[in-house]
Amino acid sequence: MSYVEEVYAKLEEKHAYEPEFLEAAKRILETITPIVEANEDLYRKNSLLERLVEPERIITFRVPWVDDQGKQQVNLGYRVQFNSAIGPYKGGLRFHPSVNQSILKFLGFEQIFKNSLTGLPIGGGKGGSDFDPKGKSDAEVMRFCQSFMTELFKYIGADEDVPAGDIGVGGREIGYLYGQYKRITNLYEGVLTGKGLSFGGSLARPEATGYGLVYITNEVVKGTGKSLEGKTVVVSGSGNVAQYAIQKAQQLGAKPVTCSDSNGYVYDPDGIKLDVVFDIKQGHRGRIKEYVEKVPTAQYFEGQKPWGVKCDIALPCATQNEINGEDAKTLIANGCWCVCEGANMPSDADAIDAYEKARVESGFLYMPAKAANAGGVAVSALEMSQNSERLSWTFDEVDEKLKGIMAGIYSKVSTAAKKYGHEGDFVAGANIAGFEKVADAMLAQGNV
Ligand code: NDP
Ligand code: 2IT
């Protein structure tokens, strides 16, 4: 058994009830095999992989709160502080009923390598709760956030652990969480990112993940001599990432024709009208099916995903495992030649196998999440820099830096893939390039 296989076998035995985490760990371990084999003695002596796959710390707590009827409710809260070798723990908070330790460990593990790829000094973490903000009043969300922070504040800090948003956590939630942190600690510091502009937020942070996704997609497409101009794009989700991916894709001349939420998807053959989506989602937290009331020429498909729609490029921007093997084959059969992931782990293992087969056979392009959606956390790190120097940069300054960071990630990923004999395989490239820096730092810092 190889070193990688040994470590994975033990992990599988120890964490048999964490399928999402095991899936993420398996993918990463398998694809870093070339660099592990090149350094096997050193890594084994330092138990590097055994340490890498275990979080430095997991904090779990109950979150009691009172609903609008006066009834006491309780949810679970978590923070997974996975790896601080290259910087303070950094990663979002997810509020969604599906949240559990396995999902947060998978997200936290991915975050280590994603954050490393940005080139900025941020370690990997993730947190959240099984609380569902959907259908809750503002007052309920505020009471929940205050209770959540009343426990979490003990474990975070501007130089220690800096949470941000993710599914179900946007500007409103970050505001309430920040207010409570400040109230309890008396500190006005950059402990959270994604803050409002009036209290230390960065311009271009709301746009950053979606814009970054399209910037790197543009690099990927340019790499084969093509352009985004006139290309049909299928997008899933209609939240923060999807909205700004659609906006940037439109600005670069492409035509996104779908978006979705957990109830179904909208197909607008004339191109998605973003003002309508903004009005539904940012205006009144509505459902995407309302789109067809405003745009009667569009169609709504209840309970379905958009992967059957003919396109050049697919940008999944909703959630994990939203594209399975069959969906991937359908996309490819309909002429799709590029998938870049806005969501975290949206393609399941069978889907990735289908992309890989198509890559080898016909040059299919696939940029995995940890490279493709790193623009969000990268601008979070830029927000931390601005908070530290107590200055605010202009939108253009941040956006230019984001563009440079995404181009840098594309270059690191392609170079690493080539260096280790996997030219064009961006999955291997992203995992190896992300791992290299973390491994160096862990080795240098000794047995911690
Ligand atoms: P939002 O909460 O703003 O939007 C999430 C969108 O995905 C909504 O349209 C939501 O629909 C849909 N969705 C969520 N869960 C499911 C599900 N189980 N099945 C179908 N649809 C679902 O979150 P974000 O846009 O911030 O996040 C989207 C993805 O991008 C996530 O994977 C997240 O981890 C990732 N990401 C986010 C970053 C950020 O900066 N925000 C950075 C990097 C990655 P509904 O409203 O019906 O639930
Ligand atoms: O998955 C992610 O990278 C995020 N949700 C953003 C994390 C951050 O700290 O900005």
Image (tube, rainbow, N blue to C red):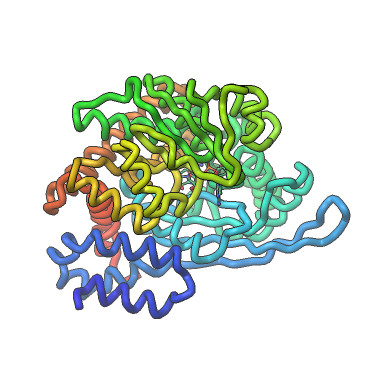
Q: Quadrant of the N terminus?
A: bottom left
Residue at 14% x, 47% y is 418
Judged from this view, the residue extending furthest toward the right is 70
Residue at 46% x, 36% y is 235
Residue at 56% x, 64% y is 100
Instruction: Kindly indicate the quadrant of the structure image that contains residue 299.
Output: top right
Direction from residue 60 to residue 326 in the image, left or right: left
Direction from residue 208 to residue 447 in the image, left or right: left
Q: Quadrant of the C terminus?
A: bottom left
Direction from residue 108 to residue 266 in the image, left or right: right
Residue 109 in the image: state x and y as whole percent.
40, 59
Residue at 48% x, 29% y is 204
Q: Is residue 335 above or below residue 129?
A: above
Residue 215 in the image: state x and y as whole percent.
35, 30
Residue 127 in the image: state x and y as whole percent.
54, 57
Q: Is residue 141 above or below residue 147?
A: above
Direction from residue 73 to residue 210 in the image, left or right: left
For the residue pair 227 and 336, the one nearer the viewer reads as 336
Q: What number of labels is visible?
A: 0
Is any atom of residue 118 visible in this view? no
For the residue pair 212 and 245, the one nearer the viewer reads as 245
Is any atom of residue 77 visible in this view? yes
Residue 21 in the image: state x and y as whole percent.
43, 64
Q: Is residue 257 above or below residue 237?
A: above
For the residue pair 203 and 255, the one nearer the viewer reads as 255
Instruction: Kindly indicate the quadrant of the structure image that contains residue 192.
Output: top right
